[in-house]
């Protein structure tokens, strides 16, 4: 009986290994997507954004600093906004992210933004289709802060 239980436990452990490896692989893929996306900001590289953000994806945001209406763009419009000219204060802008969850073919990432005079949060959703991860939505909010230059 003990041998059978050990064999069963060993078999269950072996079956769990590929799932754990896939999760790590997916986490690594999502991490690379996010690194590419955030690296596009300092150089305003629209091609890099196009590479990781689905052209029909959507960006929706709200910031009192920009008025009361929701702002919305497609992934293509977002990429076009990265026109090769970085923000004048880009060297003072800080961005960090945390992969919040990965479930099957869906991932959620929180991005913290700390800019001179503004602090914000993005939530980015990625989907894995045909074996490839891509950003599908970016929702953001932000507030004015007193650290204006």
Image: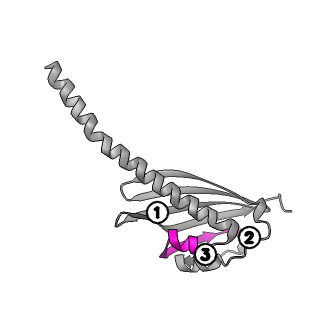
Membership of 14 in magenta stretch: no
Q: 54 or 66: which is nearer to us?
A: 54
Label 1 with label 3: CB-CB less than 8 Å: no
Rate crowding at label 1 as few (under 14), some (14 to 19) or many (20 or more) other CA atoms within 10 Å: many
Query: Which residue is outermost to the right?
Result: 149
Which portion, as a residue range, is magenta?
Answer: 47-64
The correct choice, above or below, for 25 with respect to 6 in the image is below
In terms of secondary structure, where does tag 2 sit?
Answer: helix
Rendered position, 73 above or below 107 = below
Neighbor class of circle 2 (other Cα within 10 Å; few <14, some 14-19, many 20+) is few
Give the spatial CA distance, label 1 vs label 3: 18 Å
In the rendered image, residue 8, in percent from the top left (x then y), is placed at 19, 30
In the image, taking residue 105 as reference, residue 67 lies left or right, namely right
For this rendering, which residue is in front, 20 or 118? 20
Q: Write the residue at 52% across / 52% down.
A: 99
Tell me the residue that label 2 is attached to.
65
Could you say which is closer to the camera, residue 94 or residue 61?
Answer: 94
Q: Position of residue 126 (x, y in %)?
A: 46, 63
User: The C terminus lies in which quarter of the figure?
Assistant: bottom right
Pointer 1 residue: 126
Q: Which mark is residue 103?
A: none
Position of residue 114 in the picture relative to residue 8 (left or right): right
In the figure, 3 relative to 91: above or below? Answer: above
Residue 105 position within the rendered picture, expressed as x and y whole percent measured from the top left: 37, 59
Q: At 72% across and 62% down in the image, what residue appears? A: 143
Numbered disc 1: secondary structure: strand
The answer for how far apart the CA atoms under marks 1 and 2 are is 27 Å
Residue at 46 percent of width and 51 percent of height: 27
Q: CA distance from mark 3 to mark 2?
A: 25 Å
């Amino acid at each position: 009986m003990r041998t059978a239980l050990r064999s069963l436990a060993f078999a269950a452990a072996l079956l769990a290994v590929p799932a754990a490896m896939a999760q790590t692989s997916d986490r690594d893929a999502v991490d690379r997507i996010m690194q590419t996306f955030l690296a596009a900001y300092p150089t305003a590289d629209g091609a890099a954004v196009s590479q990781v953000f689905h052209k029909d994806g959507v960006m929706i945001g709200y910031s009192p600093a920009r008025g009361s209406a929701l702002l919305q763009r497609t992934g293509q419009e977002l990429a076009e906004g990265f026109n090769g000219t970085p923000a004048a204060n880009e060297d003072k802008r800080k961005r960090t992210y945390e992969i919040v969850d990965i479930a099957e073919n869906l991932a959620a990432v929180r991005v913290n933004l700390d800019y001179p005079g503004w602090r914000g949060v993005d939530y980015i959703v990625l989907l894995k289709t045909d074996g490839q991860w891509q950003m599908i939505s970016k929702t953001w909010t932000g507030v004015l802060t007193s650290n204006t230059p």
